[in-house]
Image (cartoon, rainbow, N blue to C red):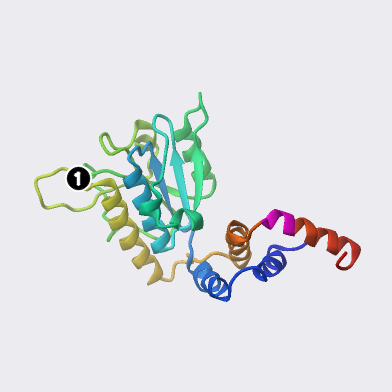
Amino acid sequence: MATDAQRYEQLAAFISDNKRALFDRIAPLRTRHVTVVLEDIYQPHNASAVVRTADLVGVQDIHIIENRNKYTVNPDVTLGSSKWTDMIRYRERGRDNARDCIRALKAKGYRIIATTPRADGATPETIAIDAPMAFCFGTELTGLGPALLDAADEHLRIPMFGFTESFNISVSAAIVLYTVMRRVRNSDVPWHLSDAAIDALKLAWARKIVHSASHLEERFDREEGTGGPE
């Protein structure tokens, strides 16, 4: 059975030189030290803008809770960024999807950080960055639900100096992710993916752009089983 690195090299023969160079440059810059949680975001523009921001700052995973509202993206806003990020969805009927998301993140060692304009806690400039962080953003009108607020290990606020109560959610996510990721990259925190995770990520990207990748992989497996091409 081929390793992820070996399988990627096989599929890479069907990828342009430019795209392979991009994969080689960008994959080592991705991180799961920081992740995003979006709860019941219903405006496609905002949902899409957060995906685009996550991609641009190098955050690989986006956790999406769909209790009341279906999460949809606008391709005119994402500009393809949804292809390169991983969306983990929690949307089973009859389930408390917020609590399922919290359990999954805590099992992976994440601190649950609730963003709220009413918090008296840390800011993006002051929050501790040594342990993995899951920044949670709620609906445009009501913010985060009680499950996430109650489960939060910390609360985060963005300092504001105007009359209105809060930033637009996509703006809030951009401020938080850009500020925190700039601090993380300038620190000694081990934020990089492992070599194995980088191999797996490049393979996942290749599978998204190589036409009939699954059929090619079946052919590769047959050839490996017989010792050579048919």
Provide residue 163's location: percent of width, then percent of height.
Answer: 9, 45
- Kindly tell me whether residue 161 is visible in this rendering: yes
Give me the residue at 71% from left, 64% from top.
7
Query: Which is more toward the observer, 152 or 192?
Result: 192
The N terminus lies in quadrant: bottom right
Residue 149 falls inside the magenta stretch: no
Q: Name the residue under label 1.
A: 166
The vertical placement of 87 against 126, above or below, is above
Magenta stretch, main secondary structure, is helix
Which range of residues does the magenta coloring cover? 212-216
The vertical placement of 164 against 81, above or below, is above
Position of 139 compared to 59: left or right?
left
- Kindly tell me whether residue 154 is visible in this rendering: no
Query: Which is more toward the observer, 193 or 106?
Result: 193
Query: Which is more toward the observer, 213 or 84?
Result: 213
Position of 147 compared to 12: left or right?
left
Q: What residue type is labelled 1?
A: Ser
Position of 118 compared to 113: left or right?
left
The C terminus lies in quadrant: bottom right
Give me the residue at 46% from left, 53% from top.
82
Give me the residue at 77% from left, 56% from top.
218
